[in-house]
Image: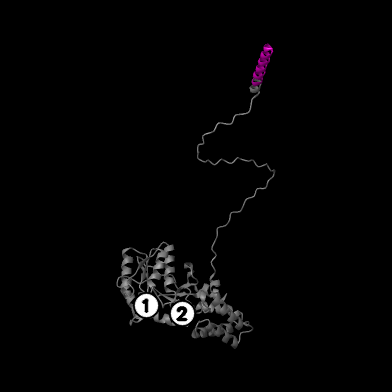
Amino acid sequence: MDALVYVIVVVAIIAVAGGIFLYTRRGGPEAPPRPREEVEAPSVEAPEEAVEEPAVEDAPTITEPALPPVEVVRPSLRDRLKRSRKFLSDRLADALHGAPDDETWEDVEAALIQADIGVATATRIVDDLRGVARERRITHAEEVRGLLADELVSLFEVERDRALNFAPENPTVWLVVGVNGTGKTTTIGKLSADLGNRGRTVALAAADTFRAAADEQLGVWAERTGATLVKHQPGADPGAVAFDAYKHARARNVDVLIVDTAGRLHTKTPLMDELSKVRRVIEKEGVVHEALLVIDATAGQNGLVQAKEFAEAAGVTGVVLTKLDGTAKGGIALAIEETLGIPIKLIGVGETTEDLEPFDPKTFIDALLA
């Protein structure tokens, strides 16, 4: 019996050992992975895999057209004179119908007067038109429009030199005069901007010492256009400011000195006397190459009265006619040259610095009668 138990135990041990041997040969369950030490590495963006597009036979080649450069389209002079043009053309349209007769000429004269050309000038224009129409045997009033354009252009000296004068040696001096509110300071700023764009150095003299904040406004333009500003304390002698500004411009070899002047004084000194003094002070040391009178076109015939006064006191050499885009009576331009004989050199037709343009009589009349 003991022998039998012994045999059974031995057989069981052999069976268990054999099973274990076979189990390990076939592979048991995988042991869990050993923990890995984490190391923070710099992030590197993986390159995108190249994906080949499927070949397409006879695929069209599409070339996108290059976009043209963006251009700022500025309104034409005709568009900017639309108020004056419409005002005059509407009245001429009423006058010019059928065969020209006495009523036609009266209506044309009235239209010209209403456009601020002036009574004397309008009367002379119509008398000339009536004579030419009779000589050419014009039978339709619409033909008078062409004659009128020629007649208006003839009021200007077309061949006259309207360019701004520069000195052969620095500094060039421009004196800018005009009553307050005509756009005098803005005109100076536009002149400074244009000169700077052309590579010229500019100094501005704040000789309008009587108007509050005049030097501040001029200072804004000086900063905006890269010009030097010469100023004194409020209420200082305008002649002293002009004198110091000229010495500065000459010492620094500045190309152009632009002198702002008072348009109205709060003292007993008459304005015209003060302007004459400013000019005399500058001319003790140098030369005033331009005395530009700024006239607001919306002032109409009042601007003509101003021009007469300033022409005598400041020795005006040219007129800057501003705010032409804001008036229906641009005919004042003809009255100025016809009456005073002072050339209009520049016109203001907008707010930007590019809207101060050289004046060309034919272009102006074409725009006015378009």
What secondary structure prevails in the magenta region? helix
Image quarter (top left, top right, bottom left or bottom right) of the C terminus: bottom right
Is residue 9 at least partly visible in the picture? yes
Q: In which quarter of the image is residue 176?
A: bottom left
Is residue 131 at least partly visible in the picture? no
Q: In which quarter of the image is residue 3?
A: top right
Question: Callout 2: helix, strand or loop?
Answer: helix
Residue 365 location (% of width, % of height): 53, 75
Callout 2 crowding tier (Cα within 10 Å): few <14, some 14–19, many ≥20:
many
Please name whichever residue, 1 or 187, is drawn nearer the observer in this view of the structure.
Answer: 1
- C-alpha distance separating marks 1 and 2: 16 Å
Image quarter (top left, top right, bottom left or bottom right) of the N terminus: top right
Residue that sits furthest to the bottom in the current view: 102
Residue that sits furthest to the front in the current view: 1
Query: Relative to 303, does residue 351 appear above or below in the rendering?
Result: above
Residue that sits furthest to the left in the current view: 284
Upstream in sequence: badge 1 or badge 2: 1
Label placed on residue 336: 2
Query: Relative to 85, does residue 171 appear above or below in the rendering?
Result: above
The residue under label 2 is which amino acid type? Ile
Query: Relative to 133, does residue 57 appear above or below in the rendering?
Result: above
Q: Quadrant of residue 192?
A: bottom left
Look at 51% across and 75% down and name the residue there: 326
Whether residue 66 sits left or right of residue 11 in the image: it is left
The residue under label 1 is which amino acid type? Ala
Q: What stretch is highlighted in magenta?
A: 1-20
Q: Mark 1 points at which residue?
A: 314
Whether pointer 1 and pointer 2 mark residues with C-beta atoms closer than 8 Å, the reply is no
